Image (cartoon, grey):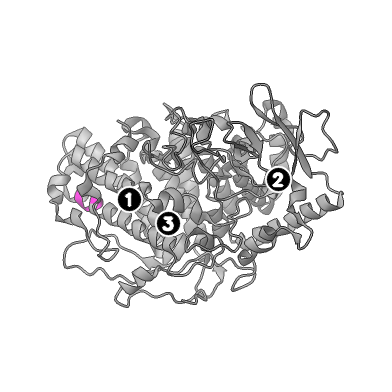
Amino acid sequence: MKLKLILAIIPIFIIATSCDKDFLEPDSISTFDLDYIYSNVDDARNGVNAVYSYFNQDAFRSRLSNNMTGSTDIEIGYHNGEYDNGRREIWNLDALASNNDLNIVWTYAYRAIRDANIAIKGITNSGNLNSTDVNVKNTFNHLLGEAHTLRAYWYSMLAFHFGDVPYVTEAPVAGANFFFPKTNRNEILANEIQALIDIEANMQWREAVPFSIEQVTREYTLGMIARLALQRGGYYLTPELNMVRDSDYLDYYNIAKQYSKKLIDLKDRPLPTDFGQIFLNQNKLIVPAGDDEILFEVPFANGGGDVGWNIGIRVDGGTDAKHAYGSGSNYMAMPPTYYLSFDSKDKRRDVTCGLFKVTVEDVNEHVGINISQAKWNRRLLPTPPGRESAKGTGINWPMMRYSDVLLMYAEAENELNGPTSEAQTAFKRVRQRAFNEEDWAAKVDGYVTQISASKQTFFDAIVDERAWEFGGEMIRKYELIRWGIYSEKIQETVADLKVLADKAFNGTGTGPDYMYWKNDTSGKFVILNPDTKILAAPDDTWNRESFLLRMHDDTNTYQEWILNDYNNYYNGPKPGVVRYIFPIPINAIESSQGTLANDGYQFTN
């Protein structure tokens, strides 16, 4: 049975929670005898599954996975002044402590951490880590690694969104103190990294676990060590609204290099040659056999998960639809600057950037500049979920891919030693897949030679390559933060958008002021001029859609979203600094008995 199905039927006593208690206080699970639960493999598996179950809550499936990722140089959440005490204030970086989405994320993050701590305690005290039964010993050691890795993920997200937060590593017991003060975010990250370093060698590779990439494996944990190390070694926002990084940052780049290289050395695999197939598998609900590019993806059961509902190709459904795939949209678009940043021969562009939607007539139609994340499309589901369906597509969400490991290694090696041949080789492996082999001499080898002129030029190329490789996977915000270039890249994006709009309006640009499109005889959506300006289509079979010209506004010069929706990212409380940290939810403040407060960051509440 797949893990996604197990999570759908996980015993209720494992995940039971009480809304009336403090977010750190034990719930019903603490009344069970941990010695019993962790006395055998099956019940221990259920105990760790409790931690996975929080991926199926809105805190992750629609918030952390994509809605909380804010606007970047490759994504934008259009808020247009419409506030809902939810995602729009988050996109605008002005969410208050009363924001409901912040409360959901905070609450379920700590519930996941609590259940991870319970699992860690139960496994550690069970005696099964040293069982004479090799299978039991290996399974329990791996389960311990899973619990630690999942806990580390949630602490990573809390640090990115809230900065310093309470750090709890002990399982709750009745009568204990549940009112923890804040701990420095770098202390938390350092401890979580060390915990993973201590356990990873006792974990199992993908082929030895029952649930494949729908389960945390040693591959993913090694990748998480590298990712957390780059977070710990990167920049972060202080309460005084300064972007800084600690003096020991190179120690963590060295850890990132060491553990990404460890995975490469121990479990290397070729990248699949077809970039689009990676995501087509997810849309088709296929979990590939063997060493796949995806190291871990969140398993959503049929009827669960929001992929293809609030992120992906827009599909218009409903009772009158001529298809039975339901309705889905994309809450966060991709700016035209990102689309046009791709090399015209880069095969990742059309997999990543969706320029069409599926209408109620079940035909494809151009969407103008409202570009969506094309990697996911509910219209590709193997079984139509129904005309009036929306959420619950069952499409899994990718948490890490092997190309990420290769680029993390290249980045860390460059930071430590410059663009060495090892860094260049890892970089080339990712870029080669983006182009046909006949173009490698110019687009890969020649390009990498050019960018390897210095450490800075190689770093700049890493920034670009990660944008092209991971567009729509909603990790860009965290990269821009740790690189310390968040505001800089936003300002650059806004300036470039204005230039494109000006040139389109003045008729001096070379990009597509209009795009000409049609559906061919097989129903495939085709664009005549995806990245160039043409004055007219060759015949009347083509439809015309305003593209770059749509960014101009006769009254305000530029569309409102260009002027306002990015504004707080470079002109917020401190110009030139993105205040990406949010206030701790008021519910947590009020229940903390004075141990927590929203101080610093120029919060007004």
Q: Which residue is mark 1?
A: 148
Amino acid type, mark 2: Ser
**Residue sitting nearer the eye, 409 or 541:** 541
Mark 3 falls on what kind of element? helix
1 or 2: tag closer to the N-terminus = 1
Residue 207: x %, y % from top left: 36, 30
Magenta stretch prevailing secondary structure: helix
Q: Quadrant of residue 37?
A: top left
State which quarter of the image contains the N terminus: top left
User: Is 122 included in the stretch rendered in magenta?
Assistant: yes
Amino acid type, mark 1: His
Q: Quadrant of residue 26?
A: bottom left
Query: Which label sits on residue 341?
Result: 2
Query: Which label sits on residue 156?
Result: 3
Which tag is nearer the camera, tag 1 or tag 2? 2
Q: CA distance from mark 3 to mark 1?
A: 12 Å
Crowding near the residue tagged with mark 2, few <14, some 14–19, many ≥20 C-alpha atoms within 10 Å = some
